[in-house]
Amino acid sequence: MALLQISEPGAGPDPHQRRVAVGIDLGTTHSLVAAIRHGLPECLPDAAGRVLLPSAVRYLEDGKRVIGYSALAAQAEDPENTIVSVKRLMGRRLADIAGGDKLPYRFVDGPGMVAIATPVAGEKTPVEVSAEILAALRQRAEDTFDAELYGAVITVPAYFDDAQRQATKDAARLAGLEVLRLISEPTAAAVAYGLDHGAEGLYAVYDLGGGTFDISLLRLTRGVFEVVATGGDAALGGDDIDQALAEWALARAGVAARTAQDRRAALVAARSAKEALSAAASVPWRATIGEGIVEVTVTRAELEALARPYVERTLREVRRVLRDARVERDHVQGVVMVGGSTRMPLVREAVRDLFGAQWPGRVLTNVNPDEVVAIGAALQAHSLAGHGREGELLLLDVIALSLGIETMGGLVERIVERNTTIPVAKAQDFTTFKDGQTAMAIHVVQGERDRVEDCRSLARFELRGIPPMAAGAARIRVTFQVDADGLLSVSARELGSGVEAAVSVKPSYGLADDDIARMLREGFANAEGDMAARSLREARVEAERLVLATRSAIAADGALLQAAERAEIEQLMAEALHRAEGTDAQAIEAAVKALAAGTEAFAAARMNQGIRRALAGKRLEEV
Ligand code: ADP
Ligand code: MG
């Protein structure tokens, strides 16, 4: 499909006004804000000189709250009022997280999204908690520039669905930030490396953080990125390596962690030993377990032996994404390394080895892997604020799951296929099923499966006021539009009368990354089963349609039929309906065929009568 080039609409830059636009990486464990200063993109530090802001919010009495390091420090003593990893909850419902992450919170089902019941501050939605983090970053930027912000580009994972993106936008709005655009994290990372000004072709972005792994494949064409494919594991990261190292060290020392506090101490020690081993060959793992201090020496080789299985899992995902996208390794020109865990020499070597000794591409590691996403977002914000070159090209993303509508028989008609580049608008025409049908229910769904019940329901609306017509005569154009932020609107219009109805999918929040991965897997795994189910349903719908049409024809022109003819048609209709109740698609099709054949003479008689009526009283030359 052709790439779209988008230049930002609206007024050009006002040269007299200094517009400060920032890029924000709203992360699971850390968040950052970056901007162009002195002509270069950089992450903005807090008063203590730290650029990372832990994504942690602690609620206190009297509506007060603390954000960042001090909240994180209080996590152990006040876990119920201290919210961490809230990004995992964005746009999710209670059902989406039940039995999932073992988070120490009490969840309540809010409207469309789960909320956290905090003892001191009441219920807080993930949107509100994220807004606190965004507001802290906004404050930091305004202090730095001593100016109000013009707006922000905020990054989201490439696989975030409508609900998650909408939740992120809502959080920004709540924080008083103008969202210039949401862009995907891998796209931002590629921009930080200036790849958008480099050679056209394919790039991979390998992002291994604390709790998640993401792999994305981007294609650059004429300065425009397109996310070609994404993959990953929403529960794989540096935390797993910490866990393995902590267990190993406890076993080596011959002590057991008996309390939650012991386990925490062992993990904290493991994390710092692991991080130190990215530079050193051997370090002490030291933790207070029970009453005493326990110390064990860890070498890099020992750590790597523990970490290797997790790294292997990331490589399997990389191979899978390349295979799905039908991309040869040698066609990947570079791999951008993102996330703190890519500081591990083992990870860098493993990625390089995956591509092989003959690989002409590069593993890109020289931009700080914690900052690279925020920096790319800042560069993008800068050009969106009007500082870019004339007609600067913007970035493109793809939609993570196909979008479509429910058709007769509970089947899904996909209108926008997954991995379609956004923004996109696509239309398809539908028709009515019954004679005189004046309303049509439009059910918007998301997913890769053929049956509605296997997909996710996004929205429902009705088109009313369709002028009564014979079944199949109305033409209803359903248009799907996904904007540059990945938000969907759907409209339906009856083309003859112009009646119209629309929804903006302010989605019922909630579809987890795991769910997306699962739905994709199931979509592939069930393709065959789905096909059989689809032909059965199509056969049933066809049988019903033909019986309905025959009935309305008999009601109108039954007089044209002899009693025997009529009885035979009734018999054929009964047979078709009977077959349609069974599960043998071929038998249904055969019955439908027989009915079609059995009504042929009747149809011809009706047509002749219609012509006779139309011609009645007219002379040949008038016709
Ligand atoms: P997330 O994207 O999940 O918020 P980050 O990208 O901030 O996570 O990465 C955090 C992870 O990176 C943690 O597991 C941390 O231990 C790890 N990490 C940070 N620095 C290093 C280092 N020098 N060596 C190895 N791992 C590191
Ligand atoms: Mg990250």
Image (cartoon, rainbow, N blue to C red):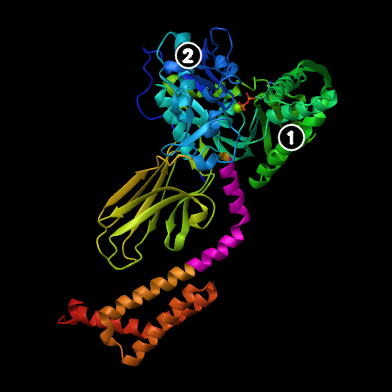
Observer-side mark, 2 or 1, equals: 1
Most common SS among magenta residues: helix
Assess whether residue 535 is covered by the magenta stretch.
Answer: yes
Most foreground residue, 471 or 54: 54
At which x and y percent is residue 407? 43, 59
Image location (x, y in percent) of residue 611 = 25, 80
Determine the secondary structure under disc 1: helix
Q: Does the magenta stretch include residue 398?
A: no
Residue 267 percent across, percent down from the top left: 71, 24
The relative height of residue 478 versus residue 105 in the rendered view (above or below) is: below
Identify whether 623 is placed above or below 447. below
Q: Can residue 417 be seen in this view?
A: yes
Q: Which numbered circle lies on residue 310?
A: 1
Residue 77 or 379: which is nearer the viewer?
77
Circle 2 packing at 10 Å, graded few (<14), some (14-19), many (20+), is many
Q: Is mark 1 within 8 Å of ligand 1?
A: no
The residue pinned by badge 2 equals: 141
Q: In which quarter of the image is residue 372?
A: top right
**Label 1: how many residues lie within 10 Å, few (<14), some (14-19) or many (20+)?**
some
Q: Classify residue 443 as left or right of residue 289.
A: left
- The residue at label 2 has a CB less than 8 Å from ligand 2: no
On the rendered image, what quadrant is the C terminus found in?
A: bottom left
Sequence-wise, the earlier of marks 2 and 1 is 2
Q: How far apart are marks 2 and 1 (CA)?
A: 37 Å
Residue 394 visible in the snapshot = no
What amino acid does circle 1 point to?
A: Tyr
